[in-house]
Image (tube, helix red, strand yellow):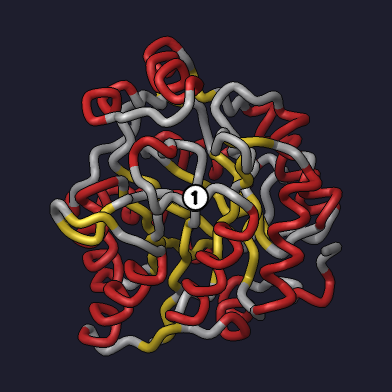
Amino acid sequence: MKKIITAAITGAVHTPGMSPYLPITPDEIVNDAVGAAKAGAAVVHIHARNPENGEPTSDLSIMREIVTAIKKQSDVIVCITTGGQIGMSIEERIAAVPDMKPELASCNAGSLNFVLTPALKRLKPKYEWEEKFLSGTQDLIFSNTFKGLSQYVETMYANGTMPEFEVYDVGMINNIAYMMREGVIKAPVYIQFVMGILGGLPATVRNLNFLVETADMLLGDTFKWSVAAAGKDQFALTTAALAMGGHVRVGLEDNLYLEKGVLAKHSSEQVERIRKALEVLGHEVATPEEARQILSLKGNHAVNF
């Protein structure tokens, strides 16, 4: 069975003081993405950062520079974030979709506390913004209201972009089911279960099974799913997901380590590791073109970058 590996390259959670290998500049992000694709990732999930200090940014010129360079070097599917950085406006977060018309874009399926303060204990900040950013999450809601969710998906559909619904807790599946009944969200649905975030569902196999069973009950045969897990739970949960029939996401956005005490230097190292598990379980890694067929994507000839 063909399985999709997604590589989430840099994200908006980790800060430069956490790892010297976190991609920051456009060239670093591009190189990490292309390397992950060569290792077997069919999808790369892309955030942009200010190349001067590594802070997440919604600057369209930086995002365009990144995704254009990736497309020139690889046929990999580019999934552009609409998560941005916690605190960005809806307009900032969605702007890249009508501008670049990607095949795939993340779409957070509900609001939650998204708390990053435990990272302060091991942070050795390189830039002034890092400590303030992490400490500020103790009193912040990652807002994804029904009104906002409607705006995201309507914008995506209007531009031929498939939403990748980021589900951090089980109630968000109910949100998707309701909006499908209302005709806002259309089948097929692609869900990325994101587990292990403080404020979301803990990253356990039992909880993953609960998420999949709930989606089966509420969405029937209209959905496909993948899983990402934060930090040390990354490989345990992604391996379990493969055994359960799902797809997987790895990468430096989710986990800075390859194993305990060993920082990953590139997302490709994590792709290679989960690919071995995938093959041991009797699956085959999906190529970008096969992933496009699995997810019913429009193809990279129809993007605007």
Question: Please, what is the three-letter code of the amino acid marked with disc 1?
Answer: Thr
Q: Residue at x 48, y 20 (%)?
A: 128
Image spot of residue 274 (x, y percent)? 29, 72
Quadrant of residue 247 in the image?
bottom left
Task: Name which residue lies at 22% across and 83% down.
Answer: 281
Q: Would you name the residue on which mark 1 appears?
A: 10
Q: Farthest residue toward the left?
A: 260
Q: Nearer the viewer, residue 249 or 38?
A: 38
**Image position of 279 (left or right of 164):** left
Total label count? 1
Q: Residue furthest top?
A: 139
**Circle 1 sits in a helix, a strand or a loop, which is it?**
loop
Q: Position of residue 223 (x, y in %)?
A: 51, 62
Front-most of 198 and 295? 198
| Res 272 quadrant in image | bottom left
In-front residue for pair 257/271: 257
